Image: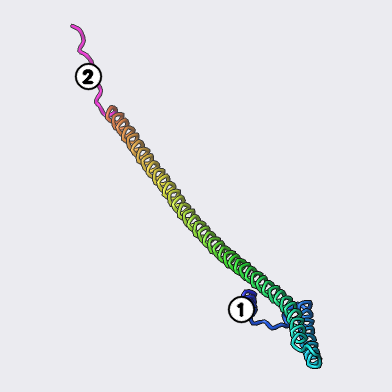
Amino acid sequence: MKKLLLLLAFLALPLASSADEPEAAKAQRARIATERGAAETEFRTAEKACYGKFAVNDCLNEARAKRRGVLSDLRRQEIQLNDAERRRKSDERVRLSEESLAADKQDEAARRAKAAAGQQGRETRAAEKAADRAAADASRSAKAAGRQDEAARKKAESQEAKQRRDKDAADAVKRQEKRVAEAEERKAALEKRLADRKKPAAKPLPEAP
């Protein structure tokens, strides 16, 4: 908005009226106009008076020369005022141009700052999303590792239990085999004792002649 106003002011400057002129310059122009009018009035008065004199032409020439001198000096002053006004307008154009350039730079700086802030925001959001994904992946990995550890623990416990059961079964078999062997040994000893009891008594040896 500021840039648009500066541009409109810059374009309208050449068309500015005398109302835009400083008060001192306007007073000078009013004075020049008054003095020019007074010079013309004085010339007409002198011109009428010359026709009543003997040397009319000399009088008229003198009156005209006086008028030219006054008008020339007034014109010189007016040219100075015009030059000063052109310089003022030129300076004003330069000022407006500089302000417009400054506004452009400010707008560009604001656009760059906004773009940088937007980029920073996007990068921050991307980093946050990446961190969230990494955290989620880490959580899933931790859960998966936990499940694997639990499965490994349960498998190890199952294997240990199976080994204990197999050992207990093997020990039970050994104990049973030992009991059976001991029972057979006792049975054999008993059968031997019984057999020994049933043998006939030995015959006596014959007497010597």
Does 199 lie within the magenta span? yes
In this rendered view, identify the residue nearer to me: 85 or 54.
Answer: 54
Report which quarter residue 18 is drawn in. bottom right
Q: Is 194 in front, or is 39? A: 39
The label on residue 11 is 1
Relative to 29, does residue 151 appear above or below in the rendering? above
**In the image, which disc is placed on residue 101?**
none
In 3D space, how far apart are the residues under numbered discs 1 and 2 (Cα atoms)?
Answer: 165 Å
Q: Amino acid at mark 2?
A: Lys
Write the residue at 69% across / 83% down: 17
- Residue 97 image position (x, y, % from top left): 62, 70
Secondary structure character of the magenta stretch overall: loop
Could you say which is closer to the camera, residue 146 or residue 195? 146
Helix, strand or loop under label 1? helix
Which contiguous range is marked in magenta? Answer: 197-209
> Whole-percent x and y of residue 57?
74, 87
Amino acid carrying label 1: it is Leu
Residue farthest to the left?
209
Q: Secondary structure at mark 2?
A: loop
Q: Measured along the vertical axis of the image, is residue 75 above or below residue 120?
A: below
Question: Crowdedness of circle 1 by 10 Å Cα count: few (<14), some, many (20+)?
Answer: few
| Residue 191 coordinates in the image, percent (x, y) | 29, 32
Image vertical order of residue 108 relative to residue 179, above or below: below
Looking at the image, residue 159 sits to the left or right of residue 58; the answer is: left
Frontmost residue, 109 versus 51: 51
Q: Which residue is mark 2?
A: 203
